[in-house]
Amino acid sequence: MDGQLDRRAELSEFLRTRRARLKPEDVGLESYGRQRRVPGLRREELAQLAGVSVAYYTRLEQGNGQNVSAEVLDAIARALRLTDAEQAHLTHLARPKQQRRRAGAARGKQPVRVALLQLLDSIDTVPAYVSGRRSEILAWNRMAAALFGDWGKLPAAERNWARLVFLNPDYRELFVNWDQKAYDMVSFLRMDAGRHPDDPRLSALVGELSVKSEEFRRLWATHDVKEKSYGVKRMRHPLVGDLTLSFETFRLVDDDEQAFITYHAEPGSPSADALRLLASWGTDAAASLPA
């Protein structure tokens, strides 16, 4: 998978998979006929719900999103019951914006502002890092290294969450619910691919992971998308044992392709005690981890 992703094929498969997951009874339609040749809604049914002609919707599902209006996309999104992230992804695929590429981004570099690096260093008790496009890990603090491993020991090309999750077996042990972590990573990459289908580095990453990981290949075929947000992760750290940590994602105002991500424990919990222990060990803790 070289060069770039095929936006028309991506649009076509995304619409087909969203349509396939809906049943007529889910959207208030009577299921006519005992034998249905396709899973989920028929094209005619979806077009009826969206208020567009079957021919128009068929062209769109074949990947021809040229000149489609925002109003029609909104109607189709409602008919398909898309999430906010899915609707944004549909818009990226059907009505791509002409994006002004930064010089650094064109070369694959995403510099982190000095002030942000200083902020990372000043946070002593909370694991925090900055991520960028393609799930790349751009910067991190001492606590993130203690929790996840010393990413500084890795070549820059391998400081990538998707690579770590799918190609490094130690991360299967670190995340108690590895399946959910894997699903999230693929969904994030899909969202990124919708924004930047012409990114050769992203295309190369997807191609490599598809070859090397059956799990990645299966999840990529679902076409599911989601945005990084917040939630809870359970981990099993080799030094301090089980942790339950809440994470928060903050998009940078001046660069929405970078996110500042933190992990914290509930005050007074065993996980908070474990984080304090990791903080006291510092670089010794990071040295014991696989990365």
Image (cartoon, helix red, strand yellow):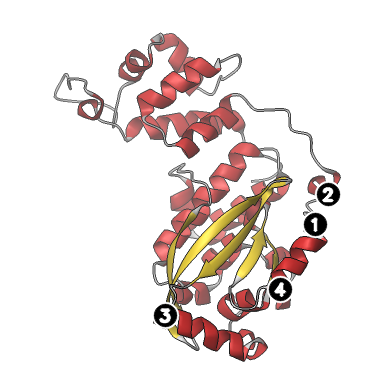
User: Where's residue 9, x and y in %?
Assistant: 55, 31
Q: Do the residues labelled 3 and 2 touch (CB within 8 Å)?
A: no
Sequence-first disc among 4 and 2: 2
> What is the C-alpha distance between the residues marked 4 and 3?
22 Å
Q: Residue 104, which numbered label?
A: 2
Q: Nearer the viewer's eye, disc 4 or disc 1?
A: 4
Q: For the point 17% across and 20% down, which residue is it?
A: 30
Q: Which of 81 and 268 is in front in this view?
A: 268
Q: Do the residues labelled 2 and 1 touch (CB within 8 Å)?
A: yes
Sequence-first disc among 1 and 3: 1
Q: For the point 56% across and 85% down, which residue is it?
A: 278
* Amino acid residing under circle 3: Gly
Q: Quadrant of the C terminus?
A: bottom right
Residue that badge 4 annotates:
122
Residue that badge 3 annotates:
268
> What is the C-alpha distance between the residues marked 1 and 3?
37 Å
Sequence-first disc among 2 and 1: 2
> What is the C-alpha distance between the residues marked 2 and 1?
8 Å
Q: Residue 111, which numbered label?
A: 1
Sequence-first disc among 4 and 1: 1
Place residue 222 in its image quadrant. Answer: top left
Q: Is residue 143 left or right of residue 106?
A: left
